[in-house]
């Protein structure tokens, strides 16, 4: 699971803008945002760079607190 949706909302960024910056289709980015599919690691790093955040901020821990 990823936090792309939450980070986009926090920053007030639209999925269409991210799709354009990534050079991906809106449908592909929407799949990432809705957690229907997970981006490859290199895409996750690219998203983090575009959003100017640490890649760790895009990941949800798999550990229960």
Image: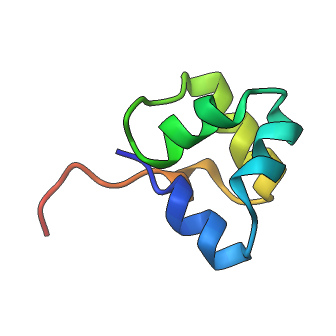
Residue at 61% over, 72% down: 9
Q: Quadrant of the N terminus?
A: top left
39 lies above or below 11: above
Looking at the image, the residue that sits furthest to the left is: 64
Looking at the image, the residue that sits furthest to the front is: 27
Residue at 53% over, 28% down: 39
Residue at 17% over, 54% down: 63
Judge by depth and name the residue closer to the eye, 13 or 57: 13
How many marks do you count on the picture? 0
Q: Where residue 60 sits: x, y (%)? A: 36, 54
Q: Quadrant of the C terminus?
A: bottom left
Q: Where residue 34 sits: x, y (%)? A: 43, 47
Residue at 73% over, 75% down: 12
Q: Quadrant of residue 44?
A: top right
Specify how the rendered protein is coloured. rainbow
Q: Quadrant of residue 45?
A: top right
Q: Is residue 30 left or right of residue 47?
A: left
Q: Is residue 46 left or right of residue 34?
A: right
30 lies above or below 9: above
Q: Where residue 10 sits: x, y (%)? A: 63, 77
Q: Where residue 20 sits: x, y (%)? A: 86, 39
């Amino acid at each position: 699971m990823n936090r792309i949706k939450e980070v986009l909302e926090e920053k007030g960024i639209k999925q269409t803008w991210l799709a354009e910056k990534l050079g991906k289709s809106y449908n592909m980015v929407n799949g990432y945002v809705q957690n229907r599919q997970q981006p490859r690691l290199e895409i996750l790093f690219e998203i983090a760079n575009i959003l100017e955040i640490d890649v760790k901020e895009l990941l949800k821990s798999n550990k229960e607190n």
